[in-house]
Amino acid sequence: MALFVILCLFKKFFSAFVKNINKEVLLMISSIGSKIKGLRKKRKLTQAQLCGDKINRSVLSLIENNKMEPSLSQLNHICKVLDVPITYFTSEINYSETAQNTCNYEKLDLAKSFLAGEYEHIIKLYEHDNKQFDAIDNINKYYYLGMSYYSLKIYKEASMALRKYVKTFSKTPISCQKDNFIEYATALNTLYKIYMQRKKYKKAEEYLIIAYNFLTENHEINSLIYFVVINNLSNIYNKTAQYKKTYTLINDFFNTHDNLTYRMIAPQLHIAMNIACYNLGKYDESIEHIQKSILLFNYGNETNEIGRCYINYINALRYSHRFSEAFELVERCKKEFYNNKVLYKKFCMQEMILYFNTGDFSKVEELLRNINVKELQEMGKNNYLFISGHIAFINKNYDTALKNLIKCEKYFIKNMYHYDLAVAYDDLFAITGDKLFLEKKKASLLNNAVRRNIVIYPS
């Protein structure tokens, strides 16, 4: 009887014990879902970003709403994305608070961490608690944060941090600005790169002009970052067909810097001047600049850069109607760069463009047959489409002409190749009878922002 009573009591106790355990388990499960959802939002991630290709989005929704328990593999994936240990979800420890408390923000050397390439470390410090990060007494803290994001190719966050840095930098004392001019100008130059990637050329140019004015006003015209800014500003002027600005900018630069300290910048500036000059009709100057660039690159034996210069040299000869010299140079380059597949294909394309401009269309057809379009880069592919499209039009193969010319139109518009577009629109109008193409041609020829490409001058 006594044994029976003991067994009953034990059963009652065990049942209560199991019930309590089940409650704790249920509480733990419900807290996991809530914690995942809370931390995901804090990290500013969407459900899709957290899921990746490891978890179904509807499954994550069930987990976050405490209707389903994550498996161990799912929880592992979530922890990796949110950058926390599993104990963050399975214990009562507030991991984010612990991380903040164990980190001595006042003693952080962000510059040292950045130079050591500890980009993720800097980002983690910010993302754990941006208020604490904002309290760090370092004028360049958002510079290091933005450049860390940029180094890891996280461009949206890089742009936000660097814009914040630029905005706050102007409010600092002048003496402090002078001590940190390199970081400030580098931040502006990096914003230029980000906006160039987005094809927002006007905004990219604005940031470079701010950097240029700041460095000039503070007499930092012999610094490396100044040379870089000049080079990038000339490139964006050429990209947007502002050739007179390039010409003035670099001429002024050469007049004030007769002894160039940074060897790698000088040939790039001569390339920019070569492009500006042949677009302005200053052909002799254009050739003189590209010859100087080739000479400077030869010191470093930089094959790819030298090859690029020769392409620009051929262009300058072609635009000035010096075709025999251009053909000779192409032939020489094909032999010299025969073992460099990329450059060799580009010189073959240059040869075809020369024959195209001299009206030897039978030779152009022969060369077209020897080109594998799939191996060409974007510019080469679109030039191939334009040339083959025009040749097809001449041969009255109108279906091919229409297809190819339409395909390259968008690329030519984007790159402001308006002379090429004028020829394409003539062909398209002749094929279709659509007067819209004549209107487009008129607009192309009225556009002052013209970048030369295949056609020297449209008819």
Image (cartoon, grey):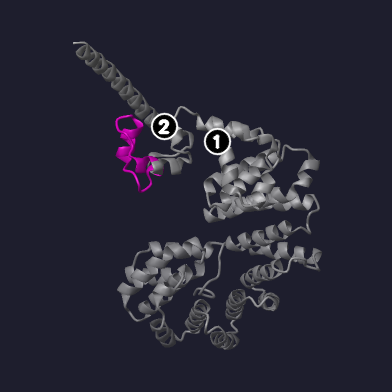
Q: Circle 1 sits on which residue?
A: 128
Q: Please tell me which residue lies in front, 133 or 89.
A: 89
Quarter of the image for the N terminus: give it. top left
**Secondary structure found at label 2:** helix
Q: Amino acid at mark 2?
A: Thr
Q: x and y percent of residue 117 in the render? A: 62, 52
Tell me what residue is drawn at x 74 percent, y 38 percent: 172
Mark closer to the chain start, 2 or 1: 2
Q: Is residue 206 above or below residue 373?
A: above
The amino acid type of the residue labelled 1 equals His
Residue 287, image x and y in percent? 67, 78
Foreground of the two, 264 or 232 = 264
Q: Is residue 358 magenta?
A: no
Q: Tell me what residue is drawn at x 56 percent, y 41 percent.
A: 124
Residue 455: where, in percent of width, then height?
A: 51, 75
Res 55 label? none
Q: Disc count in the image?
A: 2
Q: Categorize mark 2 by other alpha carbons within 10 Å: few (<14), some (14-19), many (20+).
A: few
Residue 310 sits above or below residue 137 on the image: below
What residue sits right under mark 2 in the picture? Answer: 90
The residues colored magenta run: 49-75
CA separation in Å, label 2 and label 1: 19 Å
Tell whether label 1 touches label 2 (CB within 8 Å).
no
Residue in the image at 55% along x and 87% along y: 327
Horizontal side, residue 120 vs residue 290: left or right: left
> Residue 365 appears at what percent x and percent y?
40, 84
Residue at image coords 40%, 42%? 76
